[in-house]
Every structure is written in C-alpha cells, then in structure tokens.
Amino acid sequence: MSIIDNIINSHLGEKVDSFKLYIPAPSKYNFPLKKWIQIVASKGLEELELQVATSINRTTYNMESNSIDIDTLYVLKLTGCGLSLSPNSKSLRLLKSLSLTRVQVVPLFIKKLFIHCVVLESLALDDCSSTGDLTIKGSNKFRTLLIRNCGDITLITVDNQNINTFHYDGQINKIKFVDPIISKDVILNLGIATWLQHISERHDLIEVLRNVQILSINNIVLEGLSPKYVDFEHIDMELYLPNLKELQIVIYGLSFVNPCDIILFVKNCPQIERLFLDLGNYAMEAGSYWNSIAKEKLENCKIEFPQLKLLKVKGFKRLELEKKLVNFFSSRAKWLESLIIVSKENCLEIELSDVITVSNTTMLSTYRQYEDKSCVFPKHGDL
C-alpha cells in the first residue's frame, strides 16, 4: 500500500487517462482510496477500474458517488465494489460506460442510475444479483447492454428501443423486451434447454435478431429455431436475417444439432460473409431424425452462398457428418477465400481428401488444437 501511495504521490505527469486498482483484502487495510482517486482525478482521469476481492456474499466494499466526483470520467468498472448514488450529487454526470461485476444491484439503483447519468451509453452486468426485478430504460443515447451470468436476478425487462448492441448470457425466461429493439450486434448464449420449445414463440427475442449484422449463438438457440415437428406437423425455420454479415455458432456438450440445422439457418442469411462453427466436444452423429428427414432434405437443398468469403471450423474430428457439413459450404461458396479447420485432438491430422472446394482461389489452412495460428477469430471472441 505504501508503494502505491508513493507512486501516485510522486507522479509528475500532467495527464492520467486510466487508473486501475486491485484490492485483495479491503477489510484488513485502511487504504486511502479517496485520496488516490482525487490525485488522479486532478489529472483528467477518463477511466477508473476498481477490483475488490469478493467473498461468497459478493460485495465487500461500497463507494459513494461523491468519492468519484470527476468531471472527465467516462468509463467506470467496478468488481466486488458497490456504488451508491448520492442525492443531488453532480458526480458521474458525464459517465458513458458502467460495468458492474459480482455486486448486488437493487431496482432502485438502476432507476437512479439512468436519472443520474444522463449520457450513459453502455451498461454491463456480470455475475450480479438483485433483491427484485430490474427494468433497463435509459435515454436516447443508451446503446449497449451486456448481461452475463446474472442467474440470481429473477427478471430483467428491457424498455429501450435504441439498443444497438445486446449481449446476453443466461436463461431465456429471465429476459424480456417491452418493445422490439433494432440491434446490429447480438450475442445469445442461452442456458440449458428447459425452455427450448419456447424460443420460437418468443417474438420479442426474435425481433432482436431481425436487423443484426454480427451474431453469436449457441446450440440451444439453434435447436429452438430449427425445423421441428409440433403435434405431428413439420414446422420450418421462419427466421430471416437479411443484413447478417458474420455468424458464430458454438455447440456445448450434448446436442441434437445436425448439418441440416446449421445449413438451413445460414441459408436464411443471404449476405453472410464470415462463418465460424465451433463444434466443441460434440460428436455429430446420424440419428433417426437425420436418417429419416434431414439427410434427404439436405441432399435436395439447392442453395449457394455467393457472399461467403471465410469459413472456420473448430473442433473438427473427421466424423462423416462433419465432413458433409464442411463440404456442403465449401462446394457451394464459389467466392470462398479462406477455409480454416482446427482439429479437436492434437494427434488428429486433417487430410486434403477430407475437404472439397470449388474455387481455385480458396486458401485451405489446417491446425491442431491449441496450435491455431490463423489469427482469424470472431469479432465477439469465444463464447
């Protein structure tokens, strides 16, 4: 603590853009945090990040907004550190981005937050809990909402149509939208398939995807939207994504996904340019649905992917259905520039005979697991 105090006190620069501090045991030390913040704030601080070691009870430290009364502060990230908005305080008025991790967020705080921080553009809640349901509103400037692992919150209601970026990792029944939002950047990483049959019926969630340009989903979402039998009637996929340019599909654990599900989803994305498939540990095998329906449907499917430039497949195990999937795309994408295959096992060699391409300009790259040097990754990173 004395070393940090000395560094801050002896700093001679006129400008401090960012101050990040990790506090391992706040209950054991009487650290002069307010003093440190005042010093860096006097030098035009724009980003403040505080990480406080948390116990099972999560929040171990609480800050008053008056303690961070910084006119130039635009970004605030708090981990294990609660935030109390002081009445009539003018601090944080220019805050544009707030990230809260492992803290308890009460409904009244969220309400005060959007009243207090009038130009807030981004809110991230990660592994947070709450004593009640939360409603996310915000002003016309509010554009980004990121919610991850907030399973302790019963329900989050989004009441803002201006959200451009929406990332959600959680249960489908714990999020709802008052009005459709027009998002261009979306992550839907839904939990276990308890609510699988209800995904296609969630019109508010479907509307979130209508104008998306960058999308990442897991197999739970794909299974919920794929063709299926309902009361002995075959229902086709109705979701059409005319503006989607990049798609990432990640498969976790046991899944019912087959090549036809993936291909029919991509078929409804006519502008797709970059496709990332992460097969994980899933062994794609021919089941009764594949043998009786999906296989024939795929063989009779006469579609092409004229805009597809990049296809990357991770977790490739040289299984028959995996080869069918890769070759279907590579043989129907005549302008494919790059095909990247990463094997699941380090000892697994991918042979050229495993892949069929129709374009002489397609560059085929193969890598073993943990040796991926392609430097080509989804914009969302790995889910």
Image (tube, grey):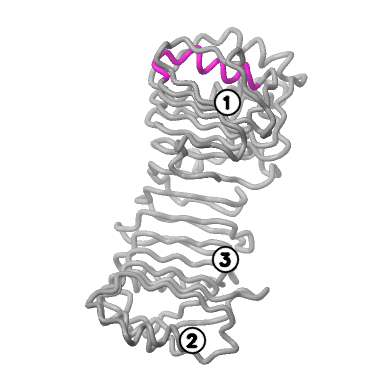
Q: Is residue 45 left or right of residue 357?
A: left
As for residue 367 lying within the magenta part, the answer is no
Residue at screen point 61% across, 32% down: 368
Q: Which residue is mark 1?
A: 262
* Residue 193: percent from left, percent from top: 69, 42
Q: Is residue 285 left or right of residue 224?
A: right
Secondary structure at numbered mark 2:
loop
What distance separates the C-alpha of mark 2 from that of mark 1? 54 Å
Amino acid type at mark 2:
Met
* Residue 350: percent from left, percent from top: 62, 22
Residue at screen point 56% across, 31% down: 277
Indicate the quadrant where residue 138 lies: bottom left
As for residue 326 lying within the magenta part, the answer is yes
Q: Is residue 338 left or right of residue 132?
A: left
**Residues at badges 2 and 3 in contact (C-beta under 8 Å)?**
no
Query: How would you classify the magenta stretch by its main secondary structure?
Result: helix
Q: Which residues are magenta?
A: 322-336
Amino acid type at mark 3:
Cys
The numbered mark, 2 or 1, whose residue comes first in the sequence reads 2
What distance separates the C-alpha of mark 3 from that of mark 1? 33 Å
The numbered mark, 2 or 3, whose residue comes first in the sequence reads 2
Identify the disc placed on residue 128. Answer: 3
Q: Which residue is mark 2?
A: 1
Secondary structure at numbered mark 1:
helix
Secondary structure at numbered mark 3:
loop
* Residue 257: percent from left, percent from top: 66, 29
The residue sitting at the right extreme is 288
Q: Is residue 298 left or right of residue 193?
A: left
The residue sitting at the left extreme is 14
